[in-house]
Image (spheres, rainbow, N blue to C red):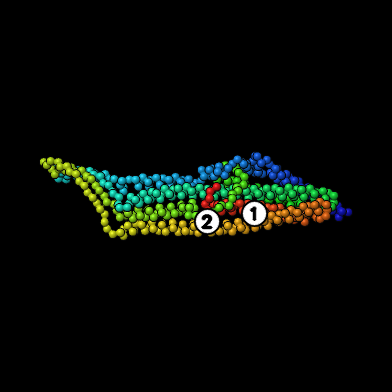
């Protein structure tokens, strides 16, 4: 009698626990289903209301996104700096003198010493003349600064383009995983309905039925995780562009060129900086050698109070001369900077070549992988349909059905991930060869 009572009590407690689990799962799946079925013409509500998903705007072009990201990029300060640098050097190269003229005033008076009436005043202007080839070098430096500014503009646009490409592909991947988790949850709910019917009819054991319940919890948890990853990707997109709407997936075609051109924006920018440094070295060498100075002065003097004032006009020329060791020492540090820039240019060229070969290899591998994955999806879909039908008719238990469902959805996700990876690698291809959006 006690044993029978204990068994009945244990059975009631088990059924009560099962009811709680089913109720929790139902509420959890209800929230997840609402998340999946939200309207596409408005923001899809995330379980955390403070982080709603971005609206998908089909009219939003990639050019609009680039313009928004370009306007918010912190490198805009560098653009203004390069423009100011080029403009100031152009003004210097147009000057008639090598430096600003200087005004000098000299005054002598002996009234505080022996007071004999000595008075002497001198005023003049000094001007530094261009050395031979110095003005031409200044014009060359101004030209290099202008080329550097233009090269930076193109390189800056390429940098922003890479950021836009990366964030759009991140959103596409996270969105794919979230949609896949939603589909998988719908499949599990359909499987759970069949399991409920068979369990109620006594065709399967409770242990088999609870496997479907556990699978539903796992899939719903995966859906929440993928939605959180999608929110993170969209937040990065909003920080980059300032927009609260996003386009559909970015799709680009394989570029026609398959080599790194010397007109690549990054290489052009580094070469422009290299040429700038070379012209700066020549400028520093000429400045260290000194400039010829011409001075024009007016002088008024009086030897004593009894003597008349004498006015005169003077012209002086100062010509520097000496060893070239002073000039060589002045450009020693600049020579090191020039060597570093040359090293950066060589490293950048080799890095781009390596990245190009890697992305070309990845695209070849992905093409073959997509063909195989397409066949795998079709086979796994057929196995899932047969397993679902067999479970519905009572010809198999739930374990093979769950495995077939997981295999089908995993293969489908794998194929779509490969396709998105191929799209991302094509964008990387275009980024590496220097093509903009």
Residue nearest the viewer, comparing 400 with 1: 400
* Image coordinates for residue 270, horizontal then vertical, percent: 45, 54
* Image coordinates for residue 320, horizontal then vertical, percent: 26, 54
* Image coordinates for residue 332, horizontal then vertical, percent: 36, 58
Q: Earlier in the sequence, mark 1 or mark 2?
A: 2
Above or below, comparing residue 302 to residue 202 in the picture: above
Q: Residue at x 26, y 50 (%)?
A: 293
Above or below, comparing residue 74 to residue 350 in the picture: above
- Dot 1 corresponds to which residue? 418
Look at the image and tell me in which quarter the N terminus lies: bottom right
Of the two numbered discs 1 and 2 in the rendering, the one whose residue sits closer to the viewer: 2
Q: Residue at x 80, y 52 (%)?
A: 389
Label 1: few (<14), some (14–19) or many (≥20) C-alpha neighbours in 10 Å = some
Q: Is residue 368 left or right of residue 26?
A: left
* Image coordinates for residue 396, horizontal then vertical, percent: 81, 55
Provide the secondary structure element on which disc 2 rests: loop
Q: Residue at x 38, y 50 (%)?
A: 141
Residue 313 in sight: yes
Query: For the residues marked 1 and 2, what is the alpha-carbon distance in whole angstroms?
Result: 25 Å
Asked if disc 1 and disc 2 are in contact, CB closer than 8 Å, the reply is no
Residue nearest the viewer, comparing 308 with 67: 67
- Dot 2 corresponds to which residue? 259
Provide the secondary structure element on which disc 1 rests: helix
Q: Which mark is residue 22?
A: none
Q: Is residue 76 left or right of residue 99?
A: right
Q: Residue at x 24, y 51 (%)?
A: 318
Residue 17 in sight: no
Residue ranking furthest to the right: 1
Residue nearest the viewer, comparing 398 with 253: 253
């Amino acid at each position: 009698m006690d044993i029978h009572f204990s068994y009945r009590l244990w059975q009631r407690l088990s059924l009560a626990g099962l009811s709680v689990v089913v109720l929790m799962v139902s509420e959890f799946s209800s929230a997840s289903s609402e998340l999946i079925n939200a309207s596409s013409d408005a923001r899809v509500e995330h379980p955390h209301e403070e982080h709603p998903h971005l609206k998908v705007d089909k009219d939003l072009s990639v050019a609009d996104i680039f313009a928004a990201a370009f306007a918010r990029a912190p490198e805009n300060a560098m653009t203004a700096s390069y423009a100011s640098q080029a403009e100031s050097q152009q003004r210097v190269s147009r000057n008639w003198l090598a430096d600003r003229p200087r005004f000098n005033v000299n005054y002598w008076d002996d009234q505080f010493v022996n007071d004999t009436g000595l008075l002497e005043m001198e005023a003049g202007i000094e001007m530094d003349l261009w050395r031979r080839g110095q003005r031409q070098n200044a014009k060359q430096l101004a030209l290099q600064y202008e080329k550097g500014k233009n090269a930076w503009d193109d390189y800056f646009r390429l940098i922003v383009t890479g950021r836009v490409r990366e964030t759009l592909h991140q959103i596409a991947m996270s969105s794919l995983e979230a949609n896949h988790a939603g589909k998988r949850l719908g499949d599990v709910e359909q499987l759970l309905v069949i399991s409920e019917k068979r369990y109620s009819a006594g065709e399967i054991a409770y242990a088999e039925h609870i496997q479907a319940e556990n699978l539903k919890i796992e899939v719903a948890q995966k859906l929440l995780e993928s939605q959180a990853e999608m929110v993170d990707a969209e937040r990065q997109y909003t920080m980059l562009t300032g927009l609260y709407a996003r386009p559909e997936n970015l799709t680009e075609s394989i570029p026609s060129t398959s080599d790194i051109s010397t007109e690549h924006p990054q290489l052009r920018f580094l070469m422009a900086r290299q040429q700038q440094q070379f012209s700066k070295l020549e400028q520093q060498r000429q400045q260290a050698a000194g400039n010829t100075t011409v001075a024009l002065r007016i002088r008024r003097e009086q030897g004593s109070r009894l003597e008349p004032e004498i006015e005169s006009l003077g012209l002086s020329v100062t010509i520097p001369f000496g060893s070239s060791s002073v000039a060589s020492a002045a450009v020693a540090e600049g020579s090191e900077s020039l060597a570093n820039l040359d090293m950066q240019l060589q490293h950048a060229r080799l890095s781009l070549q390596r990245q190009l070969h890697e992305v070309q290899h990845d695209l070849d591998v992905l093409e073959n992988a997509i063909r195989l994955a397409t066949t795998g999806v079709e086979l796994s879909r057929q196995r899932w349909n047969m397993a679902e039908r067999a479970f519905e008719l009572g010809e198999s238990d739930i374990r093979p059905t769950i495995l077939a469902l997981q295999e089908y959805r995993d293969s489908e996700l794998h194929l779509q991930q490969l396709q998105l990876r191929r799209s991302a690698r094509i964008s990387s291809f275009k980024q590496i060869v220097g093509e903009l959006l």
